[in-house]
Amino acid sequence: MTSQAAKTDESSLVQIICPPEESGGTIPLEILDCSNGWKSSGFDSAIDAIATIVGCASAPFDMGVEMVRSLLMNLPSETRVPNKHLMMISTHHAIMDGWSVRIILRDLLTAYHEYADGAVEPIGLPHLAVEYADYAVWQWQHLEMGGHLEQQLDYWTKQLANTPAPLNLPFDRPRSETSSGHEGSILPVFLPGNLVAALANLCAQYHSTMFVGLMVAFQLMLSRLAGNVEDLVVGTPNAGRDDVLLHEMVGCIIETLAIRGDLKGYPSFSTLLKRQQLIVTDALQHANVPFSRIVQRLQVPHIANCNPVYQVSTIVCHCLLIPCLIVILLYYQFLTGYAQPC
């Protein structure tokens, strides 16, 4: 993560990997000591202090200077958790994806427990067989030089030909005329355990995955909300780490898959499961091509206030259960109520 970005003469970004002697092999950590109370540290209240952390997390990055920032706050002794700390790590999405977060949290917790047990030296992490620069070179050689790019683009050109118009969902207000300013919020919805178990059993019965079952249910809901449309596209992120060599690497490898839903003929849920399982399987077999190249090949008409190809996305996440240490992930969209179209 000791990298910077710089523009070439063609105004495209390139990665600059800082040598250890320049970066020191560490990330700057800002420390806010509030152990003597919020006011002694210049804050009016706990809310004011948290707002400072949120502001630090959500501030734009100057990619030529930094791509990661961190902050450690020592909480006041009068709080319910005396002698405790709150840590914030914020990174640019260009250098980290969801998979990377799990790696960072695991290594951070390992180091935390080592120091808590009296260790005085930093933990020695295993040497990586490949680094992100190696992956970038491989991707270019595999797709551009190996001829796989055209093969995968041909698949997506056929799969996403004549994509439907943007979903006409019943919003409570008109869409913004531009891609910015889409303010939103969070509405938690909890599914009963017996419903989740029933869906899992149904998916297993038809040799489908839970992800496909949730995708089918989501597409059916969108179809009804949009006036029973029979053709729609939903985006979903793909980790892109099929190779075991990539499992321990920190970096942004994630790509977007555009999953098309074929609801023609009022099919049953079981029929949709089998139909969608084939679509998802084929999509995963052609998942190496960057989504931007697919959009470029499709020549989708530009609409200022809509994402190309799809306007709704979904993601299935596995919860991280972290004992002994509270780790708070600060997501800009969640904390500020700003939902950027993706």
Image (cartoon, helix red, strand yellow):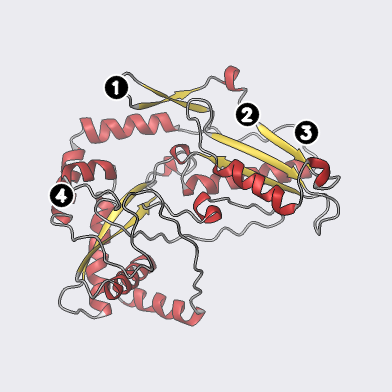
Q: Quadrant of the rendered structure where residue 233 is? A: bottom left
Q: Position of residue 224 (x, y in %)?
A: 28, 76
User: What residue lies at 25% left-to-right and 67% top-to-bottom?
Assistant: 276
Residue matched to label 1 = 10
Pick whichever, 49 or 313, lies toward us: 49
Nearer to the camera, 94 or 183: 183
> Do residues under tags 4 and 1 come within 8 Å of each other at their CB atoms?
no
Quickly name the residue at label 2.
26
Q: Position of residue 239 (x, y in %)?
A: 39, 49
Q: Earlier in the sequence, mark 3 or mark 1?
A: 1
Residue flagged by tag 4: what amino acid is it? Thr
Residue designated by label 4: 157
Secondary-structure class at tag 2: loop
Mark with earlier residue (2, 1): 1
**Numbered tag placed on residue 43 in the rendering:** none
**Image point (39%, 42%), residue name:** 253
Number of the front mark, 2 or 3: 2
Q: Disc 2 versus disc 3: distance between alpha carbons?
A: 16 Å
- Work out how far the residue at label 2 is from the one at label 1, CA to CA, in angstroms: 31 Å
For marks 4 and 1, the one nearer the N-term is: 1
Q: Which mark is residue 120?
A: 3
Measured as percent of width and height from the top left, residue 17 is found at 48, 24
What's the CA distance linking mark 4 and mark 2? Answer: 44 Å
Q: CA distance from mark 3 to mark 4?
A: 56 Å
Density class for disc 4 (Cα within 10 Å; few <14, some 14-19, many ≥20) is some
